[in-house]
Image (tube, coloured by chain):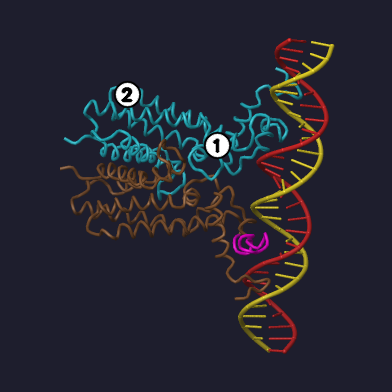
Chain colours: A brown, B cyan, C yellow, D red
Amino acid sequence: MEKKAYHHGDLRAALLDAAETLLAEKGAAGLSLRAAAKRAGVSHTAPYRHFPNKAALLTAVAARGFVALAEGTAAAAAAFADDPARQLREAGRCYVVQSLANPARAMLMFGGNVPLDGEDPLFQEAGQRAFDGLQAIIAAGQRAGVFRDDPIRPLALTLWSSVHGLVMLLLADQIRDLPADEPQRVEEMVAWVTEVTLNGVRRRE
Amino acid sequence: MEKKAYHHGDLRAALLDAAETLLAEKGAAGLSLRAAAKRAGVSHTAPYRHFPNKAALLTAVAARGFVALAEGTAAAAAAFADDPARQLREAGRCYVVQSLANPARAMLMFGGNVPLDGEDPLFQEAGQRAFDGLQAIIAAGQRAGVFRDDPIRPLALTLWSSVHGLVMLLLADQIRDLPADEPQRVEEMVAWVTEVTLNGVRRRE
DNA sequence: CCGATATGTTGACATCGACAACATCGGTCA
DNA sequence: TGACCGATGTTGTCGATGTCAACATATCGG
């Protein structure tokens, strides 16, 4: 299809794709509006017709990441509807593995140091949906007598914190002898972390 | 003491202090070499006599943060030498509270998105020292029959991940209805998270 | 006292984000 | 079919930034 000289057609989506690619290649520090514009084949100020500033583009990239992560962990949990403990294990594993599959995007989502627009509705809604799902699993586990009868929110937060902390430590290369790019050893450690944390949530006889 | 026009005397330390102040005031995005040089009262390229580039200055700021955090958590734990569970609770609480006391520095330390020199020896040594201390507490708790007999490293990693995850989620303002700047509610949630995780580490009768 | 080194300053360049003014395209209406 | 308007591009510019080179000054040691 022939491209008219002055009208891209779907530049917003093209800029988002270009930004994601640059992010994966060079990290957040290597991602500039000018580089994304060039990669999308337009002039250096064309992005300002679709995004008010750089933070808005970065926020949209992060929001896509939140949606993908929420959908991925929900799907992983949904496969074991009758087993709350298994659901939590699978959601935890998926959370870590999917985050590490796109490390620069995960850092953009969670790491700070780069101005984002935290008021973006997609941003907040996706995160909240994931947390609601986590709390629903815990509620089901409590009804089944599998989890302790403590308030759900702190239990959910503990589970989320433990996998999120593992992700952030791996992304920051903080764990000696456990590089983020050794999938089998990472999954083994994820299994450990989720199992030990699940122990803390299980009801004791 | 009189300052000679051309010789600062301890510019490296002054630049580090200026950088920390700017970081606290404006975050990582608002910290520039030129602003730090100006705050230290020298010309815009004087920093290059003490730091090869911007990343080196930021790395030095982060390294100071790692040292302070390692020392703080070690001191918190040392006050309860006979009670491994209490040591872990206090170290966990201190880790979160101290990180949140300087949120921009904590993000610089752990968040990524800003190029740092991860090979900095202070950087790695401080983090390793803290982790070694954590493992030593767990070993003592296992000898006392308080903690489960699993391998120490995954237990230590689970405890570290849970408090680290809480810090990162709070810094990223990801937890609805729990802002990072409400100390009492944060400490309450820290207590929950460390208690639930400790449950997962305790030996069961 | 002099030479070498450390440590400043000045000036310049490339890149970046953002803004203003202008140019083109697509859609709508008379 | 042509005019008009809004959407959406382009061109040019400016201030800020990181970094480098050349030069200037201060300190130290022989």
* Residue type for callout 2: Phe
Q: Which x, y percent locates residue A5?
A: 68, 72
Image height of B180 relative to B93, above or below: below
Type of residue at label 1? Asp
Q: Quadrant of the N terminus of chain B?
A: top right
Residues drawn in magenta: A37-51
Q: Is mark 2 on a helix, strand or loop?
A: loop
Q: How crowded is mark 1: few (under 14 residues within 10 Å), some or many (20 or more)?
A: some
Expressed as whole percent of the image width and height from the top left, the position of residue D1 reads 72, 89
Task: Check residue B80 in the rendering and tell me which mark sits there, or answer none.
Answer: 2
Residue A172 disc label:
none
Residue B103 coordinates in the image, percent (x, y): 49, 39
Mark closer to the chain start, 1 or 2: 2
Q: Quadrant of the C terminus of chain B?
A: top left
Could you give the CA–CA distance between mark 1 and mark 2, rounded to whole angstroms?
Answer: 35 Å
Q: Is residue A47 magenta?
A: yes
Up/down of B79 relative to C14, above or below: above
Chain of the residue under the numbered disc 2 shown in the image: B
Q: At 26% from the left edge and 28% from the top edge, which residue is drawn?
A: B141
Instruction: Give the class, few, some or many, for how many residues have Cα within 10 Å of label 2's Cα (few <14, many ≥20).
Output: some
Q: Whole-percent x and y of residue B143?
A: 24, 26
Q: Is residue A100 left or right of residue D11?
A: left
What's the residue at 46%, 37% (across, down)?
A: B100
- CB of mark 1 within 8 Å of CB of mark 2? no
Q: What element carries label 1?
A: loop
Asked if residue B102 is positioned above or below residue A149 in the image, the reply reads above
| Left-right relation of B42 to A32 | right
| Residue under numbered circle 1 | B117
